[in-house]
Structure formats: C-alpha cells, structure tokens
Image: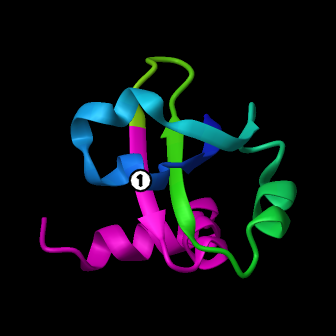
C-alpha cells in the first residue's frame, strides 16, 4: 500500500476537476513508513489516498484528526472490532 496526503484546494468542490489534485506528501510503502506517517500527520486534518500497489485500486478519505484516523487503519485490533460491531 502507498499513502498520499492530498491538497484539493478549491478543486474539492468540483468533482469534474479531480484530475487537478496535487499531492502534498507521498509515502511509497505505508507499512515501512508507518511511524513517519503518524508523526508527520499529528494535529493535522486533511484528505488522503490509500493505493493498493497490487491491483491499483484507491480509496480517498478525509479526517479532522489524521493521526487518530491513520492510527485506526494501522491497528488490526481496531479494524477487527469495528468489523465485528458493524451491521454490514
């Protein structure tokens, strides 16, 4: 997986202009760069993109507290509990 912090600027409001997204910071290997990703994004909010390097599928999300959201993604225990408690 790769992780990229994105800057949508005013383009965020127009989905037709998503091709103009500018990466602020990119990490080529999220697992190896986990500590750096968390420390770089402490006390920050933003829009981010996860990219699966095997099948090239992407997920774009946003968070008011990037550190908390990314910590959740890196915690297998938290994800298992969330899946167990979800209705889907």
Where is the N terminus found, in terms of image quarters? top right
Residue farthest along the top direction in this orientation: 55
Q: Which residue is drawn at 56% across and 50% down?
A: 7
Q: Residue at x 51, y 29 (%)?
A: 52
Q: Position of residue 87 (x, y in %)?
A: 13, 73
Q: Where is residue 63 in the image (x, y as percent from the top left)?
A: 48, 71
Residue 86 sits inside the magenta stretch:
yes
At 51% from the left and 79% from the top, the residue drawn is 64
Residue 34: x %, y % from top left: 78, 54
| Front residue of this view, candidates 28 and 77 | 28
Between 54 and 9, the residue placed more toward the observer is 9
Name the residue that disc number 1 marks. 10
Q: Which colour scheme is used?
A: rainbow
Left-right relation of 38 to 10 = right
34, above or below 69, in the image:
above
Rendering quarter of residue 67:
bottom right
Q: Quadrant of the C terminus?
A: bottom left
Q: Is the magenta stretch mostly helix, strand or loop?
A: helix
Say left or right for 46 vs 12.
Answer: right
Which class describes the residues within 10 Å of circle 1: few (<14), some (14-19), or many (20+)? few
Numbered range of the magenta stretch:
59-88
Magenta segment includes 54: no
x and y percentages locating residue 62 in the rendered image: 44, 63
């Amino acid at each position: 997986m790769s992780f990229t912090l994105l800057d949508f600027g005013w383009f965020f409001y127009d989905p037709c202009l998503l091709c103009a997204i500018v990466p602020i910071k990119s990490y080529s290997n999220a697992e190896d760069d986990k500590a750096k990703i968390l420390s770089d994004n402490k006390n920050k909010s933003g829009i981010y993109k996860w990219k699966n390097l095997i099948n090239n599928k992407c997920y774009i999300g946003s968070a008011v507290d990037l550190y908390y959201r990314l910590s959740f993604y890196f915690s297998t225990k938290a994800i298992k509990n969330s899946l167990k408690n979800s209705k889907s």
